[in-house]
Image: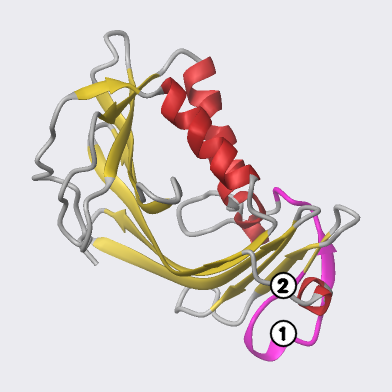
Amino acid sequence: MSPVSKGVAMGKMIDGDEFVHDMSDAAESLNCYSFKYETTVYKGRRTVDQKGDFCFKKPRQIRVAMTGDYKNGAVAVLTRDGKVRGHLGGALSPFVMTVQAKSDLLLGANGYPLVDSDFASMAEVVKGFIKDGMKSQVSEHPLPVDGQARKVYVIEILKGPSASELYKRAYIDPETLLPLEWFDYIDGHLFAHTVWTNLVTNVDLSDDLFKL
């Protein structure tokens, strides 16, 4: 996994607002899916590595199982009725509780709520950035980037008075319009990097996965 997104051979960048809506439509079209993800958060000289298995099924049901060092063994499930059930790992795994969606127990290493990590919710967050006045731009054509075997669209969110500060960058699959990698920046410095792999879409997932 590449730790930085520098050195991208940027081609012509165009306004990304329409592309973001296309991404949202692509995510909304999926009835169910699963993937593995890995997030690395850079905190000074220290890094925090988070890995997990993620499942989604309509109506909006989510299951996240933590498999890496960060909160290893913890599981959170967003149920059909909108409640979130979860447990910690290790010796505490038998103790299942109902928690608030914004609880610290449900935050990823990057501070983002795990139960808002489905593709549709992520697209809504990006649309919110644009609504708040940030600028979106996307490569006119798919580009070659380090770490990806195929060319990808590169989309960026810029903020600041002159929309010159890089805030978010993502690599988007040109066929599915779903994210492959995501980069978060604070004051121009890379803060977190997420990679999605093993994506499986529109295969039936058992309802039992979303019970805890």
* Farthest-out residue, bottom: 91
What's under tag 1, amino acid-wise?
A: Leu
Give SS at disc 1: helix
The reply, left or right, for residue 208 in relation to residue 66 is right
Near mark 2 (Cα within 10 A), the count class, few <14, some 14-19 or many ≥20, is few
Q: Quadrant of residue 136?
A: top left
Of 87 and 199, nearer the camera is 199
Q: Which residue is mark 1?
A: 92
Q: Residue visible at 26% across and 45% down? A: 190
Q: Residue visible at 27% across and 48% down? A: 152
Kindly tell me whether residue 62 is visible in this rendering.
Answer: yes
* Farthest-out residue, front: 175
Kindly tell me whether residue 126 is visible in this rendering.
Answer: no
Of 62 and 75, nearer the camera is 62
Q: Which residue is mark 2?
A: 204
Q: Residue visible at 55% across and 25% down? A: 128
Q: Is residue 42 above or below residue 159?
A: below
Of 65 and 152, nearer the camera is 152
* Farthest-out residue, right: 81
Magenta stretch in the rendered image: 86-102
Residue 182 point in image, percent of width and height:
36, 49
Closer to us: mark 1 or mark 2? 2
Q: Quadrant of residue 43?
A: bottom left
What's under tag 2, amino acid-wise?
A: Asp
Q: Residue visible at 60% across and 82% down? A: 73
The earlier-in-sequence mark between 1 and 2 is: 1
